[in-house]
Amino acid sequence: MKTLMPFQIIGRDFLAMRYNAVLADDMGLGKTLMAIEAMKQLKITSALIVCPLGVRRTWVKVIQDQYPGTFVREITTPRAIPHQNSINVVNYDIVWREPLVKYTNISWPLLIADESHFLKTIESKRTKSLLGRGGIYNLCQRRWMMTGTPILNRPIEIYPILRSLFPERLGVFQTYYRYAYRFCAGHRDTYGFNADGASNLGELAKILGPVMLRRMKEEVLDQLPEIQYEKIYLDPTNKLNELVEKENRTDMTEVKSIRQAVGLLKIAPAITHIEEVLQTKAKIVAFTWHKVVAHGLKDHFKDRAVLFTGEESVDAKETAKQSFIENPKVQVFIGQLEAAGMGIDGLQHVCDTCIFVEMYGVPGKIKQAVDRLRRIGQEKGVLAQFLIAENSVDEKTVDALVAKSTNIKTILQDKGGVKFVQCRCAICKKPKEVSELKRVDEMSVCKHCEKLLEVL
């Protein structure tokens, strides 16, 4: 069971004190944990939690770990019936479907919409089902919206939430057109009515102020560990469960083929999860173990991704790295752990989030890969997410990694963990890791300056 950090206590109390609220903290600050702790504080044991498919299982696991004694029901099909005396977790893709939507139209003490930017389109079926005039929210005593990106691109995207949950805050701007004209620079063009702009943003910020709590990672950096480890549990399909069970009782000669089969199964949910993260983050690093899995990801993201698998030439690897760093259209760096897990520098300047689609069985190797982002030049805490199946070898590896990290901090008596040693090259004066410096003529110099000295 996790203990809340000071800023998370504020977030928990912010929710617990309000019937309607928007928790819009940056990704990785623990919005799920804060919401569950707020439920505990209010002794709520019956709720409807709606979330993206990729984190549905994670919600179930965290509730079970953090709020023992409650009954959690995972809704995996529109034919399932929610239990009114339990915490029901359902994904956006099915919450509006028949017959499930009929069973959700009962009284709930609490509705949580995780990643509520999924409700940005007023005409979508999911938005109508949850926030429409006859939507589920009408029958819920409390409604908490949670998102790291309350406004993805335009002010019109938060209108469905404001109209349904905070009409009194909008005042005379409750109707779509009045809101659009006032805050979205609404106008008519050759294609019809256009509400894609932005206007009077200061006024809109004042409307949102009392009902929305938003903290960015850099604001609470002094309270965060340098690396946050987060498990993202995969949907436990029959095929996945079968492979995990087989992996746990199979000798090493057969494990390789099983792990590749698991990796191939992960491609589809990994793509879904990465796409969801990219709504919040501009860039992410995705690690795989099997090259075929890396290529499967690349086939989906195409020009939005670069590959670094060890098959590429030296020039191609450098081009891939620089494209990720310099080109805003390149959002995903797909690295095979053996090739990209060490020796790469520069990613930390544009990215603070890595997602392990697959893992290596040695925690130290995983730590080395995470350190591609946790390096000098990283101005934010690093978030490392692991796509794992329950009771799998990967889950045990993550647990061992976290335990090892905790033990190191305890031994060093340092709550913040191991700090970087700020070393500089004696010639170019650029900050470098100790391991990147070499003693030449009684000076510590980087590899680049070492070559210059050789020429001289």
Image: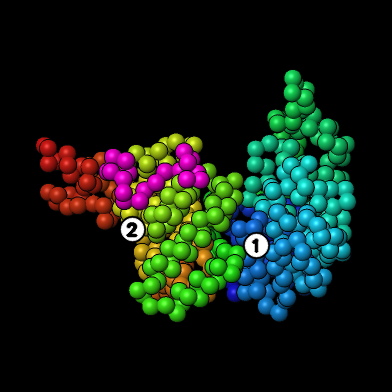
Which residue does the image show at 67% across and 78% down from the upper left? 68
In the rendered structure, which disc, 1 or 2, sits on the residue that comes first in sequence? 1
Which residue does the image show at 69% across and 58% down from the upper left? 91
Label 1 to label 2: alpha-carbon separation: 31 Å
Across and down, in percent, residue 41 comes to 74, 71
Across and down, in percent, residue 266 comes to 51, 59
Q: Give residue 197's quadrant in the image.
A: top right
Q: Give residue 358's quadrant in the image.
A: bottom left
Q: Is residue 304 magenta?
A: yes
First to last magenta residue range: 299-317
Across and down, in percent, residue 213 comes to 69, 52
446 or 78: nearer the eye?
A: 78
355 or 303: nearer the eye?
A: 303
Which residue does the image show at 51% across and 60% down from the upper left? 265
Q: Amino acid at mark 2?
A: Glu
Residue with the mark numbered 2:
338
Residue with the mark numbered 1:
56
Across and down, in percent, residue 107 comes to 87, 64
- The answer to whether residue 430 is visible is no
Which residue does the image show at 59% across and 67% down from the upper left? 237
